[in-house]
Image (cartoon, rainbow, N blue to C red):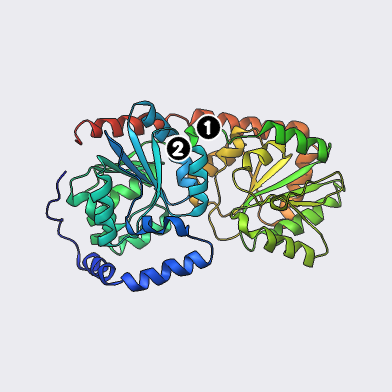
Amino acid sequence: MSAVASPRWPLPLALYAFTGRIAGPALGYYLRRRMARGKEDPARLPERWGIAAIARPAGKLVWVHGASVGEMLSVLPLIERLCQQGVRVLLTTGTLTSAELAAKRLPKGAIHQFVPLDVPQAATRFFDHWKPDLALFVESEFWPNLMREAFARRVPLGLVNGRMSERSFARWQSRRSLAEALLAPLDFALAQSPGDAQRLAALGAPALFGGNLKFDAKALPVDHKQRAALAAAIGPRPILLAASTHPGEEAQILTAAAMLRNKEPELLTIIVPRHPERGDEIAALSASGGMMALQRSKGDVPDDLTPLYIADTLGELGLFYSLASVAFIGGSLVDVGGHNPIEPARLGTPILTGPDVKNFADIYAEFIARGAALEVADAKALAEVAARLMRDGAARAALAENARTVAEENAGAIDTALEAVLTRLGGAA
């Protein structure tokens, strides 16, 4: 896999690469700022420059890159299957949260590194050290300099669980030459929905519908000892869970919870913020409205009188889905695009969502059409629908069972992805 001349790059991408070559001091400042805000690991900062402290393992090596937690979790079953085949895997992500989860959940035979900055010098160091036999980008991660380095070294590069939203498609259409330069040289592109496949293909990618890997993910882990302890402490109270919430959304959750308590006075509301470090911020918000919250990060345990519990810890979402009477999936009452409903579906949790689900539009469309999730427009609707479900055990059970069925029927994308990867690996040495 010796380096060859890079493909001809459109002028904007060539200028992007040139800017990266001379931007070292500015990027160093950028990383220091992120480190000061707790968004970088000081001990692993060299990885962002493509400098590894771990030796490359012998044998076939597949490099897999996903942006953060969601992408990592979606591709984890594929990584596990590759490791079972004796293939070594290098996973790169860009966030501390994903790195912490990778340390807990990556199988033997897989390594985690932080993704290098998308500048030519970092890309060169990264490829010189790791020498991947195949590269996989997950969902919609397109980094021009890293991709160019792969193309230049004739490393097969594929896209798995590919996603191209209508909004992104409209932006890329106005930059068609750039899109084709990045996507046309892909060795393969497996899209997570027929619509995504159509949009990727229209921009030059060799795209096919491969199914959504999120349907093949294992159920989120549940610590049954912790679950039993929490269930005993809470007692038989109804629980409204707000999962993966974002700024601007918690205030609406608190409003809905106040309305819901008029009908369910014993209600316990649990908020699991998408970013656990926001726990203090949410506690201050609730206190300003006259409600004192307990925080899991501080070792607090709710009792039979606690009105609000903030689960600001990492990797425990499955635990709280398993306890919830009803789960509202966040990122959908604000302009974020929603989060994954398959996770609560696998744990038998009734699902509610707000209207903004563009990141999972096809999945939510099927869930809602098949009675596997319900959409609520605002805080008032959330309170009303949650109250109805909490008083109707049969309706809750039907919603949960429908969701579980949809999740099971859509599984199978992992086999398509695994076949594509192993086929290309055969000729990658």
Q: Are marks 1 and 2 in contact (CB under 8 Å)?
A: yes
Tag 2 residue:
76
Q: Position of residue 16 (x, y in %)?
A: 27, 67
Element marked by disc 2: helix
Amino acid type shown at disc 2: Leu
Q: Position of residue 391 (x, y in %)?
A: 81, 38
Q: Badge 1, how many Cα within 10 Å: few under 14, some, many 20+?
A: few
Residue found at x 27% / y 56%:
123
Tell me how far mark 1 sits from mark 2, CA to CA: 9 Å
Element marked by disc 1: loop
Q: Position of residue 144 (x, y in %)?
A: 28, 58
Q: Say which quadrant the C terminus sits in.
A: top left
Quarter of image, res 120: bottom left
Residue 218 circle label: 1
**Residue 162 seen in the figure:** no
Seen in the image, is 348 located left or right of residue 60? right
